[in-house]
Image: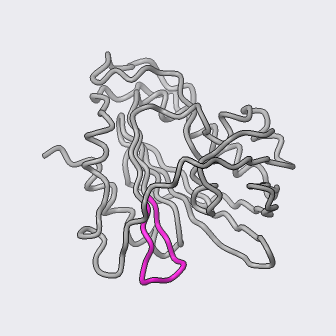
Amino acid sequence: MRVRVATTTILGITAALLAVPACSTDTVGTKPDTAPSARTGKPANTLTVLSSAVLEARLLDESDLGSGYLRKPEPSAQHDDVTVIGCPALNELGGDAATGSTLTFPRKAKASFTYGGSSSEVSEELYSDSANKLSDGIGRIFDAMTGCASYQVVAGGTPIDMASQKLTPPHGLGDEQWSQLLTFIAGGRSTVVKQTAIRDGSLLLIVSGSPALVDRHLDKALAKATATN
């Protein structure tokens, strides 16, 4: 499959691969979805769907993270071709769904940071929609990615070998949790990225980046994202 995405950085590629497919409209405060989730069989939470502006205000910033963090500018409008090879589960989702180039929830916000002037990075993504749609969407993407132990991504003509490993997610956070470890090998260099997703009612949090930074800031990110004041 060949699609267009906004960036070829490691975190950019993982964010694109993990992006949630959506089929909803961008109406804030829509009628709650109380039908049982196709994945959990439990009634969906009846929380208000949040706007992108509200989500943006709930992202972590430099003052939340502490010293040594610098927010990265948003990627340019330039797009590069991305091809996924050797992962039938991702192919079954379709090109747009697997890479999130167009099928993303409209209510969203994202911030990425570098740490200590090194190559260590951490990014946070927030999405809001009905609990059912968030649960089913992110579940399908995680199942597809962790269902392929290894595959290849060709980004802008550069081949990147990928390996995925399903992790035990942190318990006691939100209503549902997912976590995985991704290893990228390109040009003889290896990079490890951890991704953890937490759904809390009508809000979905995804934290990606260096494993130590993800573990350090996950609780803080969830607390700020779900704060009601």
**Above or below 63: residue 47:** above
Residue 87 on the magenta segment: no
At horizontal 49% and vertical 51% (from top left) the residue drawn is 197
Residue occupying the far right of the picture: 86
Residue 71 % position (x, y): 38, 66
- Compared across the picture, whether 214 is left or right of 95 comes to left
Which quarter of the image is occupied by the N terminus? top right
Number of numbered callouts drawn: 0
| Point 30% across, 63% down: residue | 220
Judge from the rendering whether residue 141 lies leftward or rightward of residue 188; answer left or right: left
Q: Residue furthest left?
A: 229
Q: Which residues are magenta?
A: 112-123
| Quadrant in the rendering for residue 114 | bottom left
Question: Residue at position x 44%, y 70% from top?
Answer: 215
Pick the front one: 8 or 132:
8
Residue 91 placement (x, y as % from top left): 79, 37
When the figure is inspected, residue 229 is found, relative to residue 103, above or below; the finding is below
Is 86 situated left or right of 190 in this image?
Answer: right
Q: In the rendered view, would you say 28 is above or below 210?
A: above
* Residue 106, horizontal then vertical, whole percent: 44, 31
Residue pictured at 61% horizontal, 61% vertical: 167
Q: Give yes or no for residue 114 being in the magenta stretch.
A: yes
Q: Residue 125, how many percent across, how many down?
A: 43, 50
